[in-house]
Amino acid sequence: MKIVDVTVDLASPIPPYEQIRGQIAAVIDSGQLEEGTRLPSMRALAGDLGVAIGTVARAYRELEGAGLVASRRRLGTVVAASSVSAADAGDVRQAAAELASRAHRAGLSEETALSLLRAALVALRA
């Protein structure tokens, strides 16, 4: 049984770990995976995708850093409890859609738009 349907395009300019991270984050953010749902083991997902275990490990580390998943002894990696309300998540999802639309109209690449967002998030932490 497949919990998540992840694919990796090795020809894409987006690094494989980021493709994996983004797809899993989207599934979690959409509410399709409930708290406590176990993700595939790093070894199994790497084998399914034909990538190195370290690639999947990096994606899982970034998901854990974002608070979307938690690594649990004996259970592996599971979907973490959400601390964000549905209304807040909806607002952010709407803002993200607007950002994507503006970036597209401006002719920005996906990576450039993501870099701009990352820089804005880093600036908030400063």
Image (tube, rainbow, N blue to C red):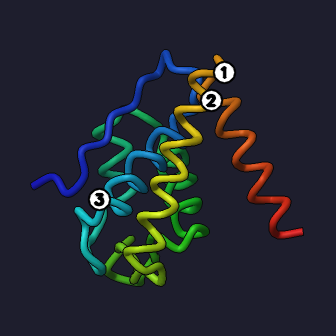
Residue 5 in the image: x percent, y percent?
24, 44
Decide which of 62, 120 is in the foreground and name it: 120
Identify the residue position indicated by label 2 in the image: 103
Query: In the image, 27: left or right of 58?
Result: left
Query: In the image, 56: left or right of 43?
Result: right
Query: In which quadrant is the N terminus drawn?
Result: bottom left
Element carrying mark 3: loop
Measure the C-alpha gap from mark 2 to mark 1: 5 Å
Kindly identify the residue that appears in the image at 48 percent across and 44 percent down: 97
Measure the C-alpha gap from mark 1 to mark 3: 38 Å
- In the rendered structure, which disc, 1 or 3, sits on the residue that comes first in sequence? 3
Decide which of 46, 65 is in the foreground and name it: 65
Residues at marks 2 and 1 touching, judged by CB atoms closer than 8 Å = yes
Residue 6 in the image: above or below residue 88: above
Residue 93 in the image: x percent, y percent?
46, 56
Residue 53 in the image: x percent, y percent?
47, 47
Identify the residue position indicated by label 1 in the image: 106
- In the rendered structure, which disc, 2 or 3, sits on the residue that comes first in sequence? 3
Kindly identify the residue that appears in the image at 53 percent across and 42 percent down: 98
Q: Amino acid at mark 1?
A: Ala
Residue 33 in the image: x percent, y percent?
25, 66
Element carrying mark 2: helix
Kindly identify the residue that appears in the image at 51 percent across and 35 percent down: 16
Badge 2: residue crowd in 10 Å (few <14, some 14–19, many ≥20): some
Query: In which quadrant is the C terminus drawn?
Result: bottom right
Element carrying mark 1: helix
Decide which of 55, 87 is in the foreground and name it: 87
Identify the residue position indicated by label 3 in the image: 40
Q: Amino acid at mark 3?
A: Pro
